[in-house]
Image: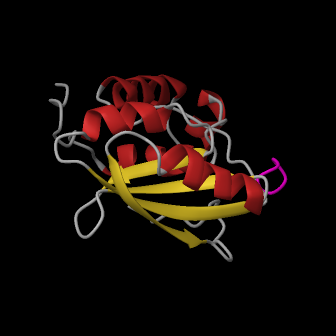
Amino acid sequence: MTAKAGRSAPLDELDRRIVEALRADGRLSMRALAEKLHISRASAYSRVERLHRDGVVTGYAAVVDPERYGFGISAYVYLKISQHSWKAVRQRVLEIPEVWHGALVSGDYDLVLLVRAPDAHSLRDLVLSRLQTMPDVTSSHTVLILDELPAEGHQPKF
């Protein structure tokens, strides 16, 4: 039984332990995963495959230190956009490499973007020349990030 789009997949305690182990280390081999959870490799393979098929696990990624990667300044940019323009603005925002995350939100603003740039000049250019001048963007508000909680090991436990 596979989960329908937009619905939660039925997960048991072992599925949740598998997800937690993969969130902690997405590079675990099936053998190491099976040993860690005291299950057979066949069970590990079939459950991980089902978790992928059901859309519970959607991929794996490297966690990058933004400063060491060359992005010395980060900010949240809040955008107000024209009504009914979400899809067009979304497509344009996806093309900007400095945007690391974005979300459509409720409240005073419509979109919140996590942006990273090499320096203040680059951030200013990104906000003033590329985001604020984008068609359908009606206003923006930028909040500099002074410090961040580390991403690794600080994700909520399910």
Q: Nearer the viewer, residue 10 or 79?
A: 79
Residue drawn at x 43%, y 41% is 134
**Is residue 73 at least partly visible in the picture?**
yes
From the viewer's perspective, tell me whether residue 82 is left or right of residue 53. Answer: left
- Percent from the top left, x then y, of residue 101? 50, 49
From the viewer's perspective, tell me whether residue 76 is left or right of residue 71. Answer: left
- Which stretch is magenta? 66-71
Q: Is residue 118 above or below residue 5?
A: below
- Is 51 covered by the magenta stretch? no
Q: Is residue 76 above or below residue 57?
A: below
Q: Nearer the viewer, residue 18 or 85?
A: 85
Q: Main secondary structure of the magenta part?
A: loop
Looking at the image, the residue that sits furthest to the bottom is 146
- Percent from the top left, x then y, of residue 100? 56, 47
Count the labels in the image. 0
- Percent from the top left, x then y, of residue 137? 36, 49
Residue drawn at x 49%, y 38% is 39
